[in-house]
Amino acid sequence: MHLVARRCFLALFILLAAAGRSFGEESSPPPGSTAFCLFELPSTSDKRVLINLGIVQYVEVLRDEVKIAYGGGNLGSGHDARVPFKSAEEANNLLSRLKQAASDCQRKTP
């Protein structure tokens, strides 16, 4: 009797695994997903810095800079990008560009 129960359990497990695999394929990020959405930060040096907007945790506007916290995980593994600015207009421009880039990445492409 235990052998029959084990076989039924094994068959059920195989069916659930197959269903889960097809479900996972259907729920993969669609084209245009924010899972990978690069945004180039303004730079004053030769180094280009691009961040993935899909892992940004928060954006903080301070008196003279915009701080973008991203990629955080356990034990302080996150990073901060700090973009200095001279006026509130520059900060608002950066925020508008961030919002637009995130919106563009979120849209689905046909």
Image (tube, grey):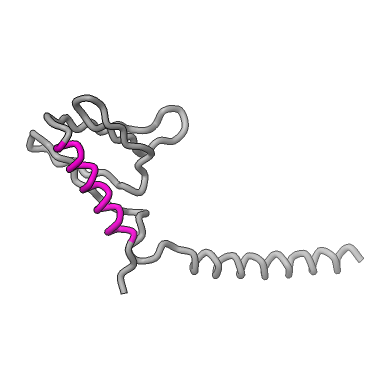
Quarter placement of the C terminus: bottom left
Q: Residue furthest bottom?
A: 110
Q: Quadrant location of residue 84? A: top left
Q: Which residues are magenta?
A: 89-106
Q: In the depicted view, which residue is nearer to us: 90 or 39? A: 90
Residue shown at 59%/65% (left/top)? 20
Image quadrant where one finds the N terminus: bottom right
Q: Is residue 47 above or below residue 10?
A: above
The residue at 35%/49% (across/down) is 54
Whether residue 98 is in magenta: the answer is yes
**As drawn, is 99 to the left or to the right of 57?**
left
Percent across and percent down for residue 61 are 27, 31
Which quadrant holds residue 12?
bottom right
Q: Residue at x 13, y 31 (%)?
A: 87
Residue 86 screen position, x and y as percent = 11, 29
**Picture coordinates of residue 104 (x, y %)?**
27, 59
In the rendered image, residue 38 lying in the magenta stretch gets the answer: no
Prevalent SS, magenta region = helix
Q: Is residue 43 left or right of residue 21?
A: left
Residue 27 lies left or right of residue 8; in this view the side is: left
Left or right: residue 43 versus residue 99 is left
Examine the rendered structure and indicate whether residue 79 appears above or below residue 53: above
Residue 96 versus residue 68 in the image, above or below: below
Return the x and y of residue 81 as percentages of the image width and height: 25, 33
Q: Nearer the viewer, residue 83 or 12?
A: 83
List the single residue furthest toward the right: 1
